[in-house]
Amino acid sequence: MSWVGILLVIVGLLLALVAAAGLLRLQDVYLRLQAASVGAIGVTSILLASLGTGNGRIIVRALLVATFLVLASPVSSHAIARAAWLRREKLGSKGGWDETGTLADPPP
Amino acid sequence: MSETFLDAAVLVLGILGFATLRTVAKRVDIITKVLAVDLLGVLLCGVAALLGYLTGSEHYLDIAIVLALLAFAGTVSPAQVISTGSLFGRQEER
């Protein structure tokens, strides 16, 4: 595996670490949603690291999976955010407010 | 050197997957559970891709394709059920 592949795998592992840590540690459903979206970007970086293997079959399949992840991750994030907003999940972060005015606290 | 590196990468992604699985088991919030299942599917997709690079076989990437499709379906359908009450039903009035 060439140095491009190793670099992309390292970047992807760091982004996946950020995603898992954010899912464990953040206060709010909406903040955790953003952290979990970072994980899809990290796995896309790991899939792009297939360019370092030099095997044509692996590269074609990995680029197919990467394209699907890039297209599908915003859709699923939007579906989860809409479900959370319809359930009126509370905002847990300190300075945040909902501009639609349905979730609770007005701006300070 | 490269094989050792890929082994370590698979190990790191596996540990992150176990942390995510623990989130699924311990949280009571349903939306956080759905989020964690989504992240778990995506991480397993990355594990399958790394195993494919490690062995040089393209069949692991087929597993990655199926896992990505299942993670998408397994995220959108619970979100739809949570928000509207049924999978194919009409949108609720707020």
Image (cartoon, coloured by chain):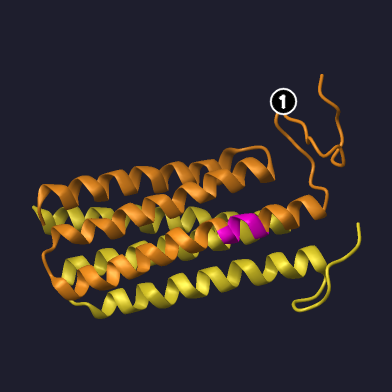
Q: Secondary structure at mark 1?
A: loop
Residue A76 counted in the magenta span = yes
Q: Image point 63% across, 68% down: which residue?
A: B76
Q: Position of residue B49 (x, y in %)?
A: 29, 66
Q: Which residue is mark 1?
A: A94
Above or below, comparing residue A42 to residue B64 in the picture: above
Q: Position of residue A34 (x, y in %)?
A: 57, 44
Q: Position of residue B92 (x, y in %)?
A: 87, 65
Residue A63 falls in image quadrant? bottom left
Shown colour of chain A: orange
Q: Image point 74% across, 53% down: which residue?
A: A84
Residues rendered magenta in the picture: A75-79
Above or below, comparing residue A90 to residue A63 in the picture: above
Residue B11 falls in image quadrant? bottom left
Shown colour of chain B: yellow
Label 1: chain?
A
Above or below, comparing residue A101 to residue B71 in the picture: above
Residue B94 falls in image quadrant? bottom right
